[in-house]
């Protein structure tokens, strides 16, 4: 009975977390860098619930009643939180179409996560006290609850990936999970009597009536209507990759992907599609085979097909977007996607470049801003090198970045400069056409540089293409060399860093620019981290390590270093996951089905580690020795992980196996340490609930810190390898004080004086 309940707690937690994450990503325009902040606030909210109840649990007599109240609150709060996430911008007075700054991201995600996650975290502390094993051996209670809850999380991740997200909307999933929690209260908790049992039955009846009366569908429509106020929403659907919303205003259809307008038809941005769809191909002598990576439908493909093209491959990740274009057709999109020369490839563009044997005369990248870690993969030195291998001799690569003909801010300057440096590392000939968006052309042929305005006009005429915007006078203005000189002068003092897969500096500069527009104070704050380097971080951790060592020598409450070690392990777990997911995306793209399985493997590792170590716990002294050994192994593992990922040791076809092992081992190491810490604490701190609260809250707070810093600052500024070294430094700040005070801690366990009940 209790095991099943704990499994459902784990399943419910991960379902709620992912549902809110996906809904908030739509609000935050799909910016991947906000994922760390959203997850961090979920962890912070859980830690508040764990710690607050963990400290008070000893004084609670009717624990089953409190457990019921918490589970009922969780069931009620989950649908409400999804509704709140959808209308958050409207409630905050932020107009549709305006982005949210990082400070707004923090506040909105915290408010949406807080009631659900706090209830879920508190349930963990209470489950540790209720679980029957605690009557004989308290440490087994904590470790087994931890293991079973993690197993439930793994099960929830699999069900989300393969059942919930593909076939149900967010409210349907939320109500199913809420109903499951209420059923547990009603069926399994037999000690519930009177008012509580009546309340459970009443809530079940309300939910059943709501579902049968199609209340979920009404709630879905109401929330979407409020979220997309003043717009006619035709469709709103989730896929395993993201959210797609279709709106109509008069005859204009707009297809939003994770809240960002991706395609507008039948009237696109005429200036952009005419320039970007024609100029790159006019610089090529005879463009026959074309590759378009993202953003092609809605005008760009139409312009390209005006040239003597024989084959056009259009790589678009999400098949649901193509399905929506077919469901709400316009003459423009029908003409583009039904042309016999067009072949739609539903896969990640970067991944397609790795596996496809085809070569092309021109490759166009339809994304225009490296705004997150996933799109940045197309604007790195490694990506440009890969594209070069897929171009025929004389082939051209073309893409655009944000620009200006008046003034380039420091962020625009550094973004363009870092990507330009990456482009020049792969191609010998590069041409920039400055404007409100800067067009970059690259080739192994000097023709991309030498072709004159006259030559472009002649090719336009010989191919019998309607010039539209590209009349001779406009071409003379757009291709004037004075703009190139102005651009070169504007970026003369820019960063010398090269935008790379594992050092995505362009992402950080774009993030700063985004926040300066919508949250100036946060933009200035982020800008202060631009010069961050590993030496500065290492100095900070050295001072922290010395301070902790000195504190432990003077303090009688030596077990605080164990809680701090769990804090650093929580930091390791979150940041290691972000690093591995990031690296997996670099290799394979947005294969979210695979990533879901990899995260489930990580959770399996935690459960395995927890169960294995629990069986071998005998004495606190041996536990301390094993604890120190695991701390050392964690440091060694991070160094190995950094080398495997960034130094090219991944062996060809065995890369997936390598990632599976990395996820599994990192999970096992986390799972090994938590029960050991519980054993050490319970040697002198006899209260199970308080111990679970202190250690679980430490674990979660470490994860929160990693979530806040990892995706926003550490990975973009320091790069992947140096971010791994930050984890090493963080773990050393707990390992070194532990080793330097080892004899004192060991003696404390023997005589029972290492800590007091309040430590």
Image (spheres, rainbow, N blue to C red):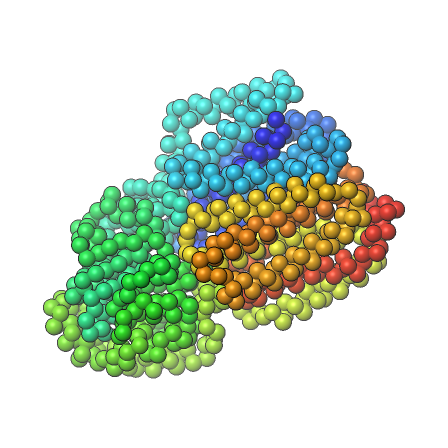
Towards the viewer: 200 or 4: 4
Q: Residue at x 45, y 61 (%)?
A: 652
> Where, by quadrant of the figure, is residue 411 drawn?
bottom left
Work out whether residue 694 can be spotted. Answer: no
With 194 as the anchor, is 562 left or right in this view?
right
Residue at (62% x, 23% y) in the render: 189
| Image quarter hosting the N terminus | top right
Where's residue 558, x and y in %? 80, 52
Is 531 on the left-hand or right-hand side of 542?
left
Q: Residue at x 57, y 69 (%)?
A: 532
Residue 470 visible (yes or no): yes
Q: Quadrant of residue 119?
A: top right
Q: Position of residue 710 (x, y in %)?
A: 55, 58
Q: Residue placed at 63% from the left, 40% from the top?
A: 147
Q: Is residue 664 above or below residue 184?
A: below
Where residue 239 appears, as percent x and y from the top left, is 38, 44
Q: Position of residue 433 (x, y in %)?
A: 30, 74
């Amino acid at each position: 009975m209790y095991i099943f309940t704990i499994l459902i707690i784990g399943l419910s937690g991960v379902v709620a977390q992912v549902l809110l994450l996906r809904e908030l990503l739509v609000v935050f325009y799909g910016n991947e860098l906000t994922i760390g902040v959203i997850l961090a606030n979920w962890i912070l909210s859980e830690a508040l619930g764990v710690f607050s109840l963990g400290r008070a649990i000893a004084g609670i007599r009717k624990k089953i009643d409190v457990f019921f109240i918490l589970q009922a609150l969780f069931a009620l709060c989950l649908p409400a939180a999804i509704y709140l996430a959808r209308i958050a911008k409207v409630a905050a007075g932020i107009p549709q179409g305006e982005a949210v700054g990082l400070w707004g991201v923090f506040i909105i995600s915290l408010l949406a996560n807080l009631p659900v996650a706090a209830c879920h975290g508190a349930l963990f502390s209470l489950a540790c006290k209720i679980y029957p094993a605690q009557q004989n051996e308290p440490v087994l209670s904590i470790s087994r609850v931890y293991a079973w809850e993690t197993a439930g999380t793994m099960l929830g991740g699999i069900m989300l990936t393969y059942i919930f997200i593909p076939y149900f909307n967010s409210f349907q999933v939320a109500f199913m999970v809420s109903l499951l929690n209420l059923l547990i209260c009603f069926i399994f908790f037999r000690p519930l009597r009177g008012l509580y049992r009546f309340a459970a039955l009443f809530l079940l009846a309300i939910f059943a009536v709501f579902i049968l009366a199609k209340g979920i569908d009404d709630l879905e429509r109401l929330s979407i209507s409020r979220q997309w106020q003043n717009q006619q929403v035709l469709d709103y659907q989730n896929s395993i990759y993201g959210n797609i919303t279709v709106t109509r205003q008069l005859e204009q259809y707009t297809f939003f992907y994770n809240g960002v307008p991706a395609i507008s038809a039948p009237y696109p941005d005429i200036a952009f599609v005419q320039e970007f769809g024609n100029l790159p191909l006019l610089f090529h002598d005879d463009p026959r085979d074309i590759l378009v990576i993202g953003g092609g439908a809605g005008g760009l493909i139409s312009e390209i097909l005006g040239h003597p093209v024989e084959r056009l491959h259009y790589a678009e990740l999400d098949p649901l977007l193509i399905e929506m274009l077919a469901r709400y057709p316009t003459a423009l999109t029908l003409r583009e996607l039904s042309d016999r020369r067009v072949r739609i490839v539903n896969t990640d563009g970067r991944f397609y470049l790795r596996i496809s044997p085809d070569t092309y005369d021109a490759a166009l990248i339809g994304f225009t801003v490296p705004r997150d870690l996933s799109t940045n993969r197309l604007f790195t030195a490694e990506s440009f090198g890969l594209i070069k291998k897929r171009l025929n001799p004389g082939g051209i690569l073309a893409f655009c970045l944000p620009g200006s003909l008046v003034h380039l801010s420091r962020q625009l300057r550094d973004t363009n400069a870092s990507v330009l440096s990456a482009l020049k590392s792969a191609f010998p000939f590069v041409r920039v056409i400055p404007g409100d968006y800067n067009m970059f052309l690259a080739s192994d042929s000097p023709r991309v540089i030498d072709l004159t305005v006259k030559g472009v006009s002649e090719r336009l005429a010989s191919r019998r293409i309607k010039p539209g915007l590209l009349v001779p006078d406009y071409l003379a203005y757009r291709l004037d060399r004075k703009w190139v000189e102005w651009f070169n002068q504007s970026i003369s003092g820019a960063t010398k860093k090269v935008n790379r897969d594992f050092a995505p500096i362009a992402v950080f500069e774009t993030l700063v620019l985004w926040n300066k527009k919508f949250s100036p104070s946060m933009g200035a704050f982020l800008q202060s981290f631009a010069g961050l380097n590993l030496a500065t971080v290492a100095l900070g951790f050295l001072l922290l390590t010395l301070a902790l060592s000195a504190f432990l020598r003077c303090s009688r409450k030596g077990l605080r270093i164990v809680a701090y070690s769990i804090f650093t392990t929580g930091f390791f777990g979150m940041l290691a996951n972000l690093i591995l997911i990031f690296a997996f995306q670099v290799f394979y793209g947005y294969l979210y089905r695979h990533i879901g399985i990899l995260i489930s493997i990580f959770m399996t590792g935690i459960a395995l580690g927890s169960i294995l170590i629990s069986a071998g716990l005998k004495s606190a002294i041996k536990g301390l020795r094993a604890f120190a050994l695991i701390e050392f192994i964690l440091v060694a593992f991070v160094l190995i992980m950094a080398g495997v990922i960034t130094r090219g040791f991944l062996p060809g076809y065995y890369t997936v196996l390598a990632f599976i092992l990395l996820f599994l081992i990192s999970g096992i190491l986390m799972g090994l340490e938590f029960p050991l810490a519980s054993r050490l604490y319970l040697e002198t701190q006899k209260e199970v609930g308080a111990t679970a609260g202190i250690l679980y809250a430490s674990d979660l707070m470490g994860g929160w810190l990693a979530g806040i810093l990892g995706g926003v600052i550490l990975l973009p500024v320091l790069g992947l390898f140096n971010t791994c070294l930050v984890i090493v430094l963080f773990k050393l700040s707990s390992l070194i004080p532990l080793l330097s005070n080892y004899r004192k801690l060991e003696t404390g366990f023997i005589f029972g004086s290492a800590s007091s009940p309040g430590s």
